[in-house]
Image (cartoon, rainbow, N blue to C red):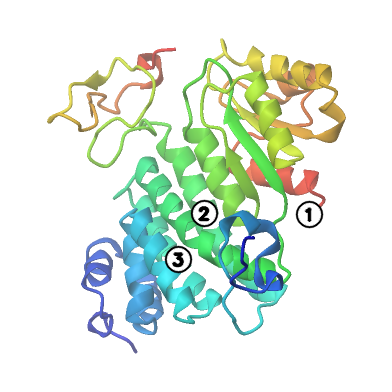
Amino acid sequence: MPELHDIANEFIRQEIDEFIERPDERARIIGLFAKASEQMQAIAAALIDGDHETVDRLTAEAIAAGVHAMEVMDDGLIAGMAIVGIKFRQNFIFVPEVLSCARAMKAGMVHIEPILSAAGIEKLGKVIMGTVKGDLHDIGKNLCIMMLRGAGFEVIDLGVDTSQDRFIDAIEEHGANILGMSALLTTTMPNMGKTIEAFIDAGLRDDIRIMVGGAPVTQDFADEMGADGYGKDALACVSLAKQFAGKA
Amino acid sequence: MARTLWPVSRWPSSSLERRRPVPDQPPITQADYQERVDRLMEILGGIISHSARQTASRCPYKNRHNCCTAQFGCRNKRKPEAPGELPVCAGDDRIDYRPAWQA
């Protein structure tokens, strides 16, 4: 049975020693990293640290050196996220750190995606995401984006305080057919409806499926303003997007 | 005239703008990829479920150093400990943090 000292990377060893308490999880994680190359351990360590630049560089180097894309996903990126998930569950890290790690994961996936594409594995669809005009809250949206990317969607993040024109331009520019809007404030929530009206005025409403979410948003509100779907959380957001993409 | 360094067929179809060649790799099937996606989604699903519980009492914008990462105003924000650092969060997680958020 592999032991902690079988893992070459000191940072990974420390992370396991300090943060993975449950014996079954500890054994599983040690086993996972003990069989991983030092290069993969380094990718996982950078991901756990939320260091997207290092993940980007190391993943590019590994792929260029001929490491198989699935090995990079298994032993580098997903293995790293496994530790992130455990640390988060045990409240050693919080949402901002998780989102940094997700950003690092995306930096690594940039090098994997062309290989998947060349193998005929396509994205589930393209989604434009943004928080509506006047609203600067982005955590919910960012968690949705993390989930959508994990599920295999290409996501274009427009950030916060997104105008109707910006949503329309993004849909046209990227050729996306799914739009996700988020609002946290009751005062900015009506801007979702105004954006939908802007799509109608632009003659684009029938070309896209629109999903909405955010703390004050309800199914009734979504129906009333003419959205195609309401997601109460990031899991529901992925289900909706899959449904819209015909991949449910 | 622009010169192509790699045969066009080796460019990823959806990423032409990246101008990056696709290295030769043993074949990857949809099932191979789906297996990884399922594993990743299990991890991320756990994260989402826990975040729903955690944010009931702790502001999701507060990082592990108790600093605020929000781009909007909040009455719990205090001066950073050093210039260039994030503002410190003064929320104590015992009362609802949401009323402190400024629209």
Helix, strand or loop for disc 1: loop
Q: Position of residue A206 (x, y in %)?
A: 87, 30
The CA span between labels 1 and 3 is: 25 Å
Report the chain holding disc 2: B
Taking the spot 70% from the left edge, 77% from the top edge, the residue there is B29
- Outermost residue to the front: B1
Label pair 1/2, CB-CB below 8 angstroms: no
Can residue B51 be seen?
yes
Residue B103 position in % (x across, y down): 44, 12
Would you name the residue on which mark 2 appears?
A: B44
The spot of residue A107 in percent (x, y) is 46, 56
Q: Residues within 10 Å of mark 3 (few under 14, many from 20)?
A: many
Q: What residue would you read off at disc 1?
A: A247
Percent from the top left, x then y, of residue A208? 80, 34
Q: Residues within 10 Å of mark 1 (few under 14, many from 20)?
A: few
Q: Is residue B27 above or below residue A221?
A: below
Chain designation of label 1: A
Q: Earlier in the sequence, mark 1 or mark 3?
A: 3
Label 1 to label 2, Cα distance in Å? 19 Å
Amino acid type, mark 1: Lys
Mark 1 vs mark 3: same chain? yes
The amino acid marked with disc number 2 is: Leu
Local SS, label 3: helix
Chain for numbered disc 3: A
